[in-house]
Amino acid sequence: MTTTFRRNKMKLCWAGALTATLWLTGCTSYMDRHIEYQTVTPESFPVVTATGFAPVARQQAETEEERILLAMRASRLEAYRELAEQVQGIYLNGETRVADMIIQSDAFRTEVSGIIRGAQVVRSYPVGEYYATELKIDFERVHNLYVSTVRPQQVRRVIYY
């Protein structure tokens, strides 16, 4: 019984050694080269600005101070929406109905969706009965934020051994 046990143990060892050898030879194609990467930076970066407006009197609050704060917030969000339109684009859906060669109805629907990173509030100020907020987004700052989190790279060179 010990002879059979030794034979099975030897077969198992040889099978393990063969598997390890095949695995290592299959991986040598990855181990015989060195890849160097570099980060690519654009030549120029645009600066995009947007202004949002909100009426103070139409804000739903009890006091004038609360209406001003709500108008400030609404104008900032409107400015962000305008930035998103410029950066991400706007989805436009239109429908026109015609009967007997006469337009019966004409409707448009727009939608903005996107993520804005790196925008800065330039200033927020009252304009008559409205509140205005100006935002700007410097794409050099956005690029630096992107590079620091994602680390985009391209292959600079490959050295084979």
Image (cartoon, rainbow, N blue to C red):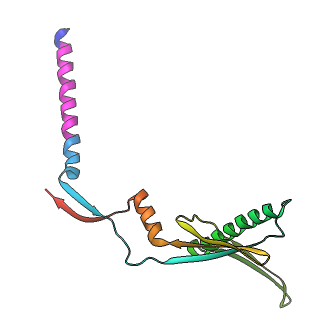
Q: Position of residue 148 (x, y in %)?
A: 41, 59
Q: Position of residue 118 (x, y in %)?
A: 52, 65
Magenta stretch: residue 13 in it? yes
* Left or right: 105 in relation to 119: right
Find the residue positioned furthest to the left.
Answer: 161
Q: Residue at x 47, y 67 (%)?
A: 142
Q: Residue at x 37, y 78 (%)?
A: 43
Is 69 situated above or below 97?
A: above
* Left or right: 42 in relation to 87: left
Q: Residue at x 74, y 63 (%)?
A: 69
* Left or right: 102 in relation to 151: right
Q: Position of residue 101 (x, y in %)?
A: 83, 91
Is 96 situated above or below 73?
A: below
Is 1 situated above or below 60?
A: above
Magenta stretch: residue 102 in it? no
Identify which residue, 11 or 113, lies in the foreground.
113
Q: In which quadrant is the N terminus drawn? A: top left
Q: Which image quadrant is residue 13 in?
A: top left
Find the residue positioned furthest to the top.
Answer: 1
- Tell me the magenta residue range: 4-22
Is 7 situated above or below 160?
A: above
Identify which residue, 32 or 11, lies in the foreground.
32
Q: Which image quadrant is residue 49 in?
A: bottom right
Q: Position of residue 143 (x, y in %)?
A: 44, 67
Q: Main secondary structure of the magenta part?
A: helix
Find the residue positioned furthest to the bottom.
Answer: 101
